[in-house]
Image (tube, coloured by chain):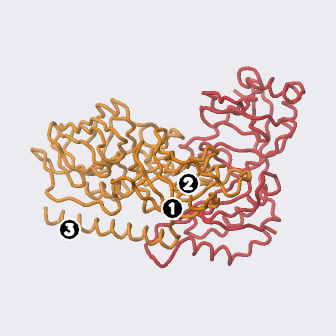
Chain colours: A orange, B red
Amino acid sequence: MSIEVLAPGLATTVQDDGRVGLRHLGIGSAGALDLYSHAVANLLAGNAADAATLEVALSGPRLRFRKPARIALCGAEIDAEVDGTAIPGWRPVQLPAGSTLVLGRCRKGARAYLAVAGGLALPDTLGSASTDLRGGFGGVHGRALAAGDVLELGAEGVPAVERLSIAPWWIDGTPDLDLSVPSRIRVLAGGDATAPVDALFTGRWRVAAASNRQGLRLEGDALALADMHERISEPVAPGTVQLPPDGCPIVLLADAQTHGGYPRIGHAIRADRPRLAQLRPGDVLRFAPCTPAEAHAAACAQRQRLTRIALAIDSRRGADA
Amino acid sequence: MTGFTIERLGEEALLLRLGERIDDDTNRRVHALAAVIDARRPPWLCDIVPAYASLALFVDDDRSDPDDDPLQHAERWLQAQDLAAAGDRDPGHQPPLEIPVRYGGEHGPDLEAVAAHADITAEEVIALHTAGDYRVAMLGFAPGFPYLLGLDPRLAMPRMDTPRARIPAGSVAIGGAQTGIYPRESPGGWRILGRTPLVLFDPARPAPALLEPGRRVRFVAATDDEAA
């Protein structure tokens, strides 16, 4: 049971929920940037929410399925075809053996997640199948997919289907995933204040082309710090908003380094990171201030919605069977 | 006495700050505090990440109780601990790890430049570099990259204006007042003195990083034969 990579797409990587507890060794978390879409795709395919998926960035791969498969695509709105038939996202799709799935451009949003029933069978590296691009390990040889790669699937086979079968029901990703722009991202206070203190929130920010899985680089009216003293390297985390000397903030994402010397002017909250992950170069966003209690409540609410989605998918699958 | 301030690092971590400067005493206290916290490690504490003068405690935030903010919980736990004596401990109880280095030549293309900058001979650079008693202040930049404190100040040299595109794995280098070792081939702007055959980082090993934070290190000059 395997998938053949006919064309790799722009930057397609294997990701799961990432690594925990290794930042003291300089090892970042990696993992899906949009953990929400990643989880829903897995649930729709019949996997555990944290199984490994393919994270497709901006432009997708061409894949051949040697055996029948059940797949689901969530996250960005992406052109997707199975042997010439367009398939929609956010629902289970059954493929007959020998199908070719062509993922084109992301029309809205930046990252789509492809889950396949049974999960991608990849060796666990330091507790995760996620690709660590900076460290060069995990996923498929520590790199993005390349033409000719073969991805093995987990043991679970799915019933053979004669023809492509698209479920008539789907999951609505809102409010956790809202692909409309300008996006609104809530931010907790960081250790360093800007001058004026609300400058991050009054400005409009545009995502720069140099953004990647390490961080979103933003362009806009340069920010200044309230206190210009020199800083030494301290631990940082995904979500940390750094302010380099050029005054343009960088929002760290899952591939962030473990330490950084730039001032930290805020932290994007977890519940809004799926939206952050979907921002494309040129997209506009605004930041809104947030308290720790609001951030925690938002994270809990998102987790509860995911739990309800899991239950709904389970009962729907029971009814379909 | 280990005095520190507590700041939130987003929703995931508390940042304990022991100082604002890079110096050996502060960093020694960071690792002593890390060791004491590690010895009492509660199950929700998933990572203890030291830096030069600070320590991040990453907590498991996978809780669903909206009334129980995990960082508040962590802060209460921290305040209930008696950490007053933590700074008096010496965390470097293990003997220093010896790191063989082939200095100069193709292994250390910047050895002569460091010597010229310090106005001493290349042999004196090697003598000073191998005489040092270093501590892994933190691992960062790349998986397993150790930032070592303890460089003789005479060897300090600013980074290159234009970083090299490709520095071989195992390169032992100087960046400002620090010395470090590149675990993997990568771009970098530090001045390369030599190269070690030791593998600093291997994700397939049970302990992927050769050097843990706080570990003491010495460099030993090796000939090509010895280090092979």
Q: Position of residue A304 (x, y in %)?
A: 36, 70
Q: Which residue is mark 1?
A: A187
Give the left or right position of residue B209, taking residue B195 as reference: left
Q: Position of residue B213 (x, y in %)?
A: 69, 52
> What's under tag 3, amino acid-wise?
Ser
Q: Secondary structure at mark 3?
A: helix
Q: Which residue is mark 3?
A: A315
Q: Secondary structure at mark 2?
A: strand
- Of tags 2 and 3, the one toward the viewer is 2
Please tell me which of labels 2 and 1 falls first in the chain.
1
Mark 2 touches mark 1? (CB < 8 Å): yes
Q: Which mark is residue A241?
A: 2
Near mark 1 (Cα within 10 A), the count class, few <14, some 14-19 or many ≥20, is many
Please tell me which of labels 3 and 1 falls first in the chain.
1
Q: Total marks drawn?
A: 3
Q: Can you say whether B55 is above or below B150 in the image?
A: below
Give the left or right position of residue A21, taking residue A96 as reference: right
The residue located at (35%, 43%) in the rendering is A56
Near mark 2 (Cα within 10 A), the count class, few <14, some 14-19 or many ≥20, is many
The verdict on a common chain for dots 2 and 1 is: yes
